[in-house]
Amino acid sequence: NRFSNITMQLNGSGFWIEERKQADDSYLAGGQVQMTYHLNDKKGEITAGVSYFSYGNARGYFPFYDNEDMCGNSFIEVDDDGETVMHYASDFELIEAYGAVSLNFGEVPVTFFGDYVTNTAVDSLDDGWLFGISAGKTKKPGNWSVRYNYRQVKKDAVVGIYADSDFRGGGTDAKGHEINLGYQLMDHTTLAVTYFNNRIDLEENETTDFERWQIDLKLKF
């Protein structure tokens, strides 16, 4: 069977993001199609997918969850009972394409991965991308893993409040590196160290440097 090595996955979702008493609620609807081709003799697999996310009632509304933090997204200033407040300047209709190639070199799995997203509701500052590589897997004591990725996320590529909360401190309008090292200390216990070196406020006259070290001790029960 020529299709025996192929698996497909369909996902759909819908969420209320923020309920409002005096205005329309904000919500998210999304769908995803993913296909994986499994190489013979367990040598690895190739994965590709496409996603669509539609945020209802974003443009002209307060930023989700925090009225004073745009998390990098563009905003407009409006008068609210004599007070100047920030609202989203755009809607968010996101199309995402992603892929990964995973290969097994003896006991060491290696994965090359990439991701691209564009916000079709705006005409500029509308896309983001990421590429990277990972090697190793922490399954048994003494195992190790390493991961590296570089990304750039423009101001309105995605909803900033939902972007990676560790990269650039959370949000959009940034680019930079992420390096992660992991080591399996013992059964069910992993130590990981992650370093972020990013630049924020890409659309401003002066960018801001952001560095973060993160140490995680993970216990599984």
Image (cartoon, rainbow, N blue to C red):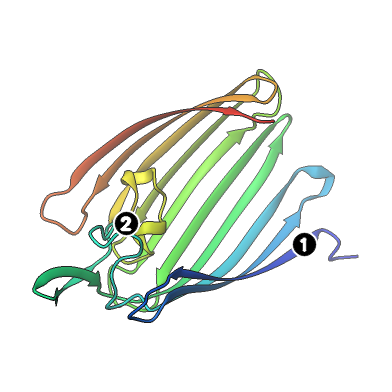
Residue type beneath disc 1: Thr
Report the residue at 19% width, 59% height from top.
203
Circle 1 residue: 7
State left or right for residue 221 relative to residue 203: right
Circle 2 residue: 172
Q: Nearer the viewer, residue 23 or 103?
A: 23
- The count of marks equals 2
Query: 114 above or below 188?
Result: below
The local secondary structure at tag 1 comes to strand
The local secondary structure at tag 2 comes to loop
- How far from the left and from the top, in percent, is residue 89? 25, 74
State left or right for residue 135 relative to residue 209: right
Query: 27 above or below 130?
Result: below
Report the residue at 11% width, 70% height from top.
83
- How far from the left and from the top, in percent, is residue 91? 35, 76
State left or right for residue 84 relative to residue 217: left
- How far from the left and from the top, in percent, is residue 166? 39, 43
Q: Quadrant of the C terminus?
A: top right
Q: Nearer the viewer, residue 6 or 200?
A: 200
Q: Closer to the N terminus: mark 2 or mark 1?
A: 1
Q: Nearer the viewer, residue 11 or 3?
A: 11
Residue type beneath disc 2: Thr
The residues bearing labels 2 and 1 have C-alpha atoms spaced at a distance of 33 Å
Q: Quadrant of the N terminus?
A: bottom right
Question: In the figure, residue 33 lies in which quadrant?
Answer: bottom right
Q: Residue furthest right?
A: 1
Graded by Cα atoms within 10 Å as few (under 14), some (14 to 19) or many (20 or more), the crowding at tag 1 reads few
